[in-house]
Every structure is written in structure tokens, then in C-alpha cells.
């Protein structure tokens, strides 16, 4: 088993960077202060990556950095508000200034909200679009040209099956993830043969504070899918497989590949049942 693991690590090195040592790998992870981002940061640092961690909450980033360094890893933190264009540019400049380039860009930052769209505060909707979509676009704009020039690199966008299942209660969130699907697909095809891969991970619900945050946002309800959430460890393992064998799309867990057919086959049923589920959540909130 140990030999198989070593072989897989070698495959990762050659598949997306073309260099020989994992110690030379660099990965930038947005939304790294909690949840999937924090877990993935620890995981990649343990694999030998120099991880660059980006999030708003500096104290959480510092705590995570201390843990990584304690375990012998390399870590640089950048506290930044990715809703702002100037802050995204600063992230790029500080990262390139420190590392020269990034091998793996993980666009993970994002948040959700569940409720009736007419009750969603406009400021909250704007922030979701800025984080879930615009930040992904700008960071890709900044980092992709260098990857193309070097002929190596991997951009991984953390998406959701919600992108293909625009159900009630998640109008803006589902729209943002549908954008990620389309954006990734177009870039994957544009970069084919360049040595760079652009991928999207279409996740099901994952056990993080994502659900608590959504619940606490103004006019938001509890997200029903929380009960089916998987561990962040499952996401880490899938992420590593994606680095080992680059492709356009990875579903996590894997059986969720069937979700791409749900809207086509059962859309009319969801049209009837979905609104009842949202109404029930609203009633529970009002009690």
C-alpha cells in the first residue's frame, strides 16, 4: 500500500506541474479559515505543498498556520475581503511576490442562503455574487495567464450539484454554481492541450459551518440537505484523486453523477413538491 501511495504522489507531480518534488508545490486556497478550505489546507500541507491561505478572518488563519507549521508544513496567510476587486489584486501580488507562481488555485470561498428570493436582502445577494462568482473570475484572470505561459497548473473550482438542480430556496446560490459549471467547462475546453486543467468539483452537502452561517443570515432558513452531509475528509480524498487524474468534473460523493439527470427526468415532480418543502421550512422558522 505504501508503494502505491508513493506512485500516486509521483503521478500527481507529473500530471499537473511537471516538477519533481512535492516540496516545490504551491497551492492557493480561498475561504481557508473554516470548513472545506481549512480541512483542505491541512491536507495539502501534509502532502508537502506550500499553502497560501486566503480568508477574511485573520485570527482563524493564524491559528491554522500555527497548526500547519507545528506539523512541519509550509504556510503563508493573506487576510483579504474577496468581495473587493482591490483585495483580489492584492492577493495575487502578495502570492506571486512570495512564491513566484502558484501550481494549484482552489476557488473555494463561498456561502449559501436558503429562503424565498423575495425575502433575500439585496446586499446579501450582491455579496454572494461577488464571492461565489466574481472573485472566481478575477482570480482566474490573474493566475491563468502565468499557468498557460509555464505550460502547467490546475485551477479547481468548488462547485455544487445545486448548479444543475436550481431548486426552490437557493435561487442565487444555485445560479452562482451553475455559472461555475459553465465557466469551468468553457475554460477546460479552451486550455485543452496547454498543460493546464480547469476543473469543477460538484459537491453534495458537506459537514461544515456552511449550514449554521446560512441559518443565521437575515431571513434565512435551515437548509434541508444538511442531514445528508458528508465529511470534509471525503472531499480531501476526492480532491487528491482529481489532482492525480485531472478531468473536467468530479462529483463528490461519486454516485451524485446521477444528479445531472434528476432535473431532466423529475423536474415536473420537483416543481410540485419543492415549494411544499420550502413552505414547511418557513413555517418551522415562524413558530
Image: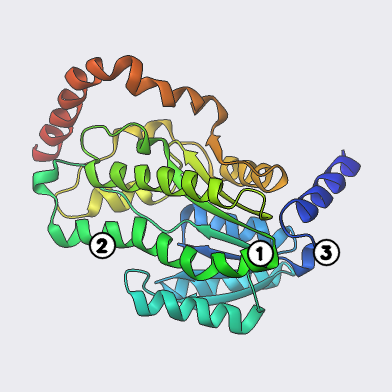
Residue placed most toward the observer, 282 or 18 = 18
Where residue 283 sits: x, y (%)? 10, 33
Pointers 2 and 1 in contact (CB under 8 A)?
Answer: no
41 relative position to 87: left or right: right
Pointers 3 and 1 in contact (CB under 8 A)?
Answer: no
Judge the density around disc 3: few (<14), some (14-19), many (≥20) Cα neighbours within 10 Å: some
Where residue 96 sits: x, y (%)? 59, 79
Label for residue 103? Answer: 1
Within the image, what quadrant is residue 234 found in?
top right
Q: Indicate which disc, 3 or 2, sits on the residue closer to the N terminus.
A: 3
Dot 2 corresponds to which residue? 127
Cα separation between marks 3 and 1: 12 Å
* Visible residue check, residue 64: no
The correct choice, above or below, for 156 with respect to 127 in the image is: above
Cα separation between marks 2 and 1: 28 Å
Judge the density around disc 1: few (<14), some (14-19), many (≥20) Cα neighbours within 10 Å: many
Q: Indicate which disc, 3 or 1, sits on the residue closer to the N terminus.
A: 3
Q: Residue at x 85, y 62 (%)?
A: 20
Quarter the N terminus occupies: top right
Amino acid at each position: 500500500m505504501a508503494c502505491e501511495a508513493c506512485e500516486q504522489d509521483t503521478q500527481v507531480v507529473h500530471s499537473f506541474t511537471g516538477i519533481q518534488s512535492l516540496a516545490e508545490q504551491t497551492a492557493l486556497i480561498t475561504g481557508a479559515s473554516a470548513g472545506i478550505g481549512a480541512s483542505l489546507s491541512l491536507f495539502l500541507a501534509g502532502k508537502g505543498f506550500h499553502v497560501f491561505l486566503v480568508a477574511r478572518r485573520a485570527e482563524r488563519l493564524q491559528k491554522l498556520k500555527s497548526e500547519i507549521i507545528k506539523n512541519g508544513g509550509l504556510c503563508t496567510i493573506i487576510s483579504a475581503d474577496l468581495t473587493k476587486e482591490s483585495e483580489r489584486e492584492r492577493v495575487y501580488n502578495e502570492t506571486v511576490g512570495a512564491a513566484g507562481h502558484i501550481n494549484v488555485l482552489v476557488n473555494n470561498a463561498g456561502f449559501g442562503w436558503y429562503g424565498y428570493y423575495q425575502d433575500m436582502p439585496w446586499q446579501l445577494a450582491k455579496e454572494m455574487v461577488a464571492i461565489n462568482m466574481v472573485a472566481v473570475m478575477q482570480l482566474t484572470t490573474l493566475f491563468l495567464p502565468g499557468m498557460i505561459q509555464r505550460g502547467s497548473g490546475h485551477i479547481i473550482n468548488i462547485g455544487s450539484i445545486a448548479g444543475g438542480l436550481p431548486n426552490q430556496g437557493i435561487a442565487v446560490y444555485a445560479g452562482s454554481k451553475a455559472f461555475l459549471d459553465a465557466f469551468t467547462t468553457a475554460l477546460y475546453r479552451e486550455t485543452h492541450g496547454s498543460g493546464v486543467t480547469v476543473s469543477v468539483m460538484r459537491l453534495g452537502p458537506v459537514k461544515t459551518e456552511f449550514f449554521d452561517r446560512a441559518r443565521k443570515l437575515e431571513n434565512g432558513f435551515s437548509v434541508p440537505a444538511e442531514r445528508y452531509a458528508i465529511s470534509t475528509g471525503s472531499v480531501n480524498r476526492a480532491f487528491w484523486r482529481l489532482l492525480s487524474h485531472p478531468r473536467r468534473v468530479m462529483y463528490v460523493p461519486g454516485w451524485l453523477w446521477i444528479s445531472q439527470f434528476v432535473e431532466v427526468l423529475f423536474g415536473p415532480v420537483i416543481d410540485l413538491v419543492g415549494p411544499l418543502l420550502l413552505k414547511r421550512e418557513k413555517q418551522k422558522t415562524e413558530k
